C-alpha cells in the first residue's frame, strides 16, 4: 500500500534541491528586508504582468489556471507581506487588529483547502478522473479530511500572545502554536494535497511541509507561520511559472490506491480530533477564554519559543 510509484534517485535529488532552495530563500527573506520585498512584492508583480497570464491561463494543460491556484497564490503573498508589516511597521505589532491578521489569514488558507476537499467529493468521481488536468478521486476521505481541516481551524489559539524577536530579523513569534498543532496541521495538509493534487503531492505536500517544519523546530522556534507563509508563496509562484514541473520535468505519481487516500485522511482526522479534545479539556480545566487566552503557556514548547528570542 505505497503512497507513490517509487521515485528514482534523480527525484530524491530534485526533492532535496527544492527543500534546501525553499529553506534558503525563506532565510533570505526572513533575515533581510530587501529579500522579502524582492521575493514577495517585486517578483510577483512582474510575474503577474508578464508571465502568469500565459503559464497560468484558465484551462491550460497543467491545471494551474484554476480559481484555487490564483486565490492561493495571492492569499499566501498577502500573508507574507502582512507579517512583514507586523514585524517592521513601528508599533503595529502591539495593535489588537494586527494580531488578529495572522490567525485570520491562516484560517482562510485552511478553509480554502477544506472547500476544495468538499468540492472534490461533490464531483462523485469514485473511480478517479482528471479535473482541470489534475487527477482526483472522490471518496469519504474528502469529507474526513475536510472535517480535520475545520478542527484545525478551531484549534488555532493564543494569537494575543504574538510577539517579535529581539534580533535584527524581528521574527513574528507565536508561542502558543506548539508542536502538536504543527504536526496536526502537517498531517491534515499532506492528506489534503494527496486528495486534491495527488500526483503533485510529493513536492507540494511532503517537500513543502518539510521546508517550513524543519526551520520551526531547528532554526527559529515559534515562527512556524512565518516560515509556512514564505515557503508556500515561493512554491506556488514557482508552480505558476513552471507548470510542467510536476507532470513532465520531475513527475512522482501516486499509486491511486483508495486505501491510501482513506488511511491518510483518517490519520489526519484522528490527530486533529485528539488535538481538539486535548485543547478543550485544557480550556475547561483552566477556565480559559479561547478567544483571548494562551492555552499552552504551561508547556515546555511555549517556553522554548520565548526563551531567548521574544520581547513583549
Image (tube, rainbow, N blue to C red):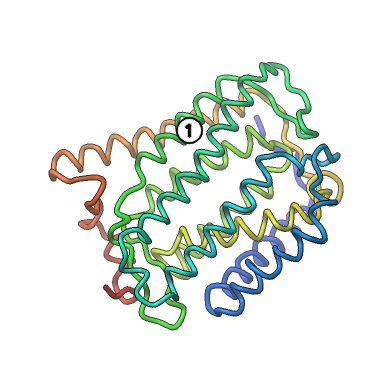
In the picture provided, is 240 more to the left or to the right than 35? right
Residue 55, image x, y percentages = 83, 51
Tell me what residue is drawn at x 72 percent, y 35 percent.
254
Q: Is residue 247 above or below residue 304?
A: above
- From the viewer's perspective, is 208 left or right of 222? right
The vertical placement of 21 against 237, above or below, is below
Tell me the SS state at disc 1. Answer: helix
Residue at (70%, 63%) from the top-left corner? 44
Q: Is 308 on the left-hand or right-hand side of 83? A: left
Establish if 218 lies above or below 208.
below
Image height of 162 relative to 58, above or below: below
Please report the residue visible at 71 percent of the width from the left and 68 percent of the height from the top. 43
Query: In the rendering, at what x and y percent does residue 143 appear?
Result: 52, 24
Q: How many marks?
A: 1
Q: Give coordinates of residue 208: x percent, y percent.
A: 61, 54
What residue does disc 1 label? Answer: 267
Q: Residue 28, percent across and down? A: 60, 75
84 or 266, which is in the foreground? 84
| Mark 1, other Cα within 10 Å: few <14 / some 14–19 / many ≥20 | some
Amino acid at each position: 500500500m505505497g503512497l507513490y510509484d517509487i521515485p528514482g534517485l534523480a527525484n530524491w535529488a530534485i526533492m532535496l534541491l527544492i527543500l534546501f532552495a525553499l529553506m534558503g530563500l525563506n532565510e533570505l527573506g526572513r533575515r533581510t528586508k530587501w529579500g522579502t520585498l524582492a521575493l514577495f512584492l517585486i517578483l510577483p508583480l512582474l510575474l503577474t504582468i508578464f508571465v502568469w497570464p500565459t503559464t497560468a491561463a484558465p484551462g491550460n494543460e497543467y491545471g494551474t489556471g484554476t480559481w484555487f491556484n490564483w486565490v492561493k497564490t495571492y492569499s499566501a503573498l498577502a500573508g507574507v507581506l502582512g507579517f512583514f508589516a507586523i514585524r517592521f511597521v513601528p508599533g503595529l505589532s502591539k495593535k489588537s487588529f494586527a494580531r488578529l491578521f495572522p490567525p485570520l489569514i491562516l484560517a482562510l488558507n485552511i478553509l480554502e483547502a477544506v472547500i476544495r476537499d468538499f468540492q472534490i467529493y461533490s464531483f462523485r468521481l469514485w473511480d478517479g478522473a482528471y479535473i482541470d488536468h489534475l487527477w482526483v478521486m472522490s471518496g469519504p476521505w474528502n469529507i474526513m479530511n475536510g472535517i480535520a481541516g475545520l478542527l484545525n481551524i478551531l484549534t488555532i489559539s493564543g494569537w494575543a500572545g504574538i510577539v517579535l524577536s529581539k534580533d535584527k530579523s524581528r521574527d513574528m513569534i507565536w508561542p502558543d502554536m506548539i508542536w502538536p498543532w504543527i504536526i496536526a496541521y502537517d498531517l491534515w495538509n499532506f492528506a489534503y494535497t494527496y486528495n486534491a493534487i495527488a500526483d503533485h503531492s510529493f513536492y507540494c505536500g511532503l517537500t513543502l511541509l518539510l521546508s517550513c517544519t524543519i526551520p520551526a523546530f531547528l532554526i527559529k522556534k515559534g515562527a512556524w507561520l512565518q516560515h509556512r507563509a514564505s515557503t508556500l508563496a515561493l512554491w506556488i509562484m514557482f508552480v505558476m511559472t513552471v507548470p510542467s514541473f510536476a507532470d513532465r520535468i520531475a513527475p512522482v505519481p501516486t499509486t491511486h490506491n483508495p486505501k491510501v487516500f482513506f488511511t491518510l485522511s483518517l490519520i489526519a482526522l484522528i490527530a486533529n480530533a485528539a488535538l481538539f479534545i486535548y485543547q478543550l479539556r485544557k480550556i475547561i480545566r483552566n477556565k480559559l477564554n479561547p478567544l483571548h487566552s494562551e492555552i499552552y503557556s504551561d508547556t515546555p514548547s511555549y517556553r522554548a519559543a520565548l526563551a531567548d528570542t521574544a520581547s513583549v
